Image (cartoon, rainbow, N blue to C red):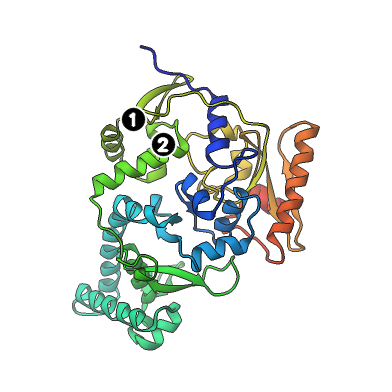
Amino acid sequence: MAARRIGVEERRARLARRHHLAPGSGAGSPVEAASAIVGLHGTDPSSVYLAAGARMPAAEPATIERALYEDRELVRILGMRRTMFVVPLDLAPVVQAACTRAIAVQERRRTVQLLTQCGVADDPAAWLAALEEATAKVLATHGQGTAAELSVHEPRLRTQLFLAEGKSYAASQSVSTRVLAQLAAEGRIIRGRPRGSWTSSQYRWTPIEAWLEEGMDDLPTDTARVELVRRWLAAFGPGTAADVKWWTGWTAGEVKRAVGKLGAVEVDLDGATGLVLPDDLEPVPAAEPWVALLPALDPTVMGWAGREWYLGEHGGALFDRNGNAGPTIWWDGRVVGGWAHRKDGEVAYRLLEDVGADAAKAVAAGAERLCTWIGDVRITPRFRTPLERDLSA
């Protein structure tokens, strides 16, 4: 039997409906918005809010902040591709076991190596372990704290690591950066409410039990990887094995094993071999035309390695050299331009192709709504792209 064909138009329809971007498909909560795209990209703090807001027509920044820090229904975690994500609580143990656990092993090895090179202690591994335990106790006692605040109670956190001494790019780094990141990667602490506005990245650290009362569930790695691929296919499928490999950051072998255990079905993506869940073969009807202004690093634009079917030839203007996406404008399932937030508060934008009068009018209205939604804060993406820089000038 020939493989089921899923063409570009149907892929765009799936994207529109499942990512809560089509008219009438908005998410009812930040948790629903995050679940729909397997987590909100969290490297850039403002992107978490903008990505959730784009999928929740009636939401305000305070709605997302409440879900993060008051209701504590979402949590920040280092995960796929060694990248920060904000995920629902039920997904955190899956990401931890599927991705973060391996990162923690690598980072501990790297930190011990740095401590050895810098001559910090006779037994760097033991010194690091003791400092981690002391830091965890300080957090348990005080409930939360920034790196600077924790260093008051545990002075060893101020220890400086001198990197690349004698080189033009020599620098120093406080050991607190690596210790706190290590504890987080091992699922013992998390990044809590930041200092400042929702664009701030200076987080207060908090014991994991403040979000997950029983701590992080310890899932088998293989089980977690199968579940993570299942969730990705439910949100982004159809996709290729190469898409899964890129998105997760796993090896080809790890992807193959997870896909095999899941029982994913092969489909025809206009000549390429795609994958879908066994119960996801029914046709998806087209959505009504829609417009969306998505933020830098939005999970939809970053969801696949093969992006031609929705990005076209606009990658050079909308991505930086390291593959980080800037703010994008979407019309009816494809990227048609980009936007930027200027210092005076204006949302400036540029269409990179002729989309017709109706679409252009919808984009203008979307830019005006976004300007109002952002309010008094100013958004500057952490990774600047050619078009975003040009529009910001």
How far across and how far down the image is residue 2, in percent? 39, 13
* Closest to the observer, 231 or 115: 231
Going from N to C along the chain, the mark reached first, 2 or 1, is 2
Q: For label 1, count other residues whose C-alpha is less than 10 Å away and answer few (under 14), some (14-19) or many (20+).
A: some
Mark 2 and mark 1: Cα distance apart in space: 9 Å
Q: Amino acid at mark 2?
A: Leu
Residue tagged by mark 2?
Answer: 233
Q: Is residue 197 positioned above or below 23 on the image?
A: below
Q: Is residue 60 positioned above or below 125 on the image?
A: above
In the drawing, does residue 338 fall left or right of residue 209? right
The reply to whether discs 2 and 1 touch (Cβ–Cβ < 8 Å) is yes
Residue 4, located in which quarter of the rendered image? Answer: top left
- View extreme (top): residue: 1
Residue tagged by mark 1?
Answer: 264
Q: Amino acid at mark 1?
A: Ala
Which residue is at a point 23% across and 50% down the rendered structure image? 220
